[in-house]
Image (cartoon, rainbow, N blue to C red):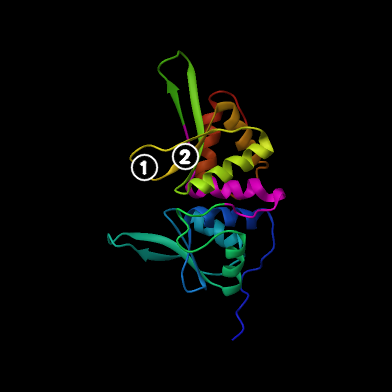
Amino acid sequence: MKPLNKTKIEWSSNFAYAIGLLVTDGNLSKDGRHIDLTSGDREQLENFLKCLNSKNKICFKHSGSNKKHLRVQLGDVNFYKFLLSIGLMPNKTKIIGEVKIPKKYFFDFLRGHLDGDGSFYSYWDPRWKSSYMFYTTFLSASKKHILWLQKMIFNRLKIKGRINKSANSSVYQLRFAKAESVKILRKIYYKNSVICLSRKKLKIQKALSIVNIKL
């Protein structure tokens, strides 16, 4: 039986963003067909469906702790094979490495990565008067993937950030402070209309406005 080609595979800003979400929060089943994206944020899943021009519905997924999570599931053999070809795989969390993203769309992919598993936080540093700190952080349980991400960002912006991993955590953090953070964020949000998690972008804008920085 010929596989159904349900997802249009064509690189664009939105398509690259959706791949970023799948790299962080997505899961490929072992059956060679199903792709799952789980999120606690409905807007995240709505954005994902919009990016892929998919009519699939958002439903609930029950975890072992009897908690409900929102998710989207796609059954698409051709898209599944495509994801394998660019570097995704089942049980990818600790083994994923490079993801083959066209250079033109890398920062769209990175925006999806940030919205999926990344974070932005800011605070007044009590050690110095009027010192306002903020950081943009990308996360992965795969050291190979976080090193690849660092390399790709350095190749484009000539900034390295810092990779760390606490002793009681299985997750690596690639963290960029202040000036480096602004460079990345301006590339990620290169125009107002880019698809993104609105609450995260608003949080970033509010924090940067404190020190009179605009995206």
Q: What kind of residue is marked 1?
A: Ser
Asked if the residue at tag 2 contacts the one at tag 1, i.e. Cβ–Cβ closer than 8 Å, the answer is no
Q: Is residue 70 left or right of residue 181?
A: left
Specify the farthest residue to the left: 65
> Residue 50, relative to residue 105: is it above or below?
below
Q: Is residue 167 left or right of residue 110?
A: left
Which region shows up in magenta? 98-121
Q: Residues within 10 Å of mark 1 (few under 14, many from 20)?
A: few
Say if residue 91 shows up in the picture: yes
Dividing the picture into quarters, in which one does residue 213 lie? top right
Whole-angstrom CA distance, mark 1 to mark 2, is 10 Å
Q: Position of residue 59 (x, y in %)?
A: 43, 66
Q: Secondary structure at mark 2?
A: strand
Residue located at (56% from left, 23% from top) = 211
Q: Is residue 95 left or right of residue 2?
A: left
Residue located at (59% from left, 60% from top) = 50
Predominant secondary structure in magenta?
A: helix
> Residue 168, relative to residue 95: is it above or below?
above
Q: Which residue is mark 2?
A: 173
Specify the farthest residue to the top: 129
Q: Residue 72 or 103: which is nearer the viewer?
A: 103
Q: Residue 78 bears which disc, if any?
A: none
Q: Is residue 114 magenta?
A: yes
Q: Residue 169 bears which disc, if any?
A: 1
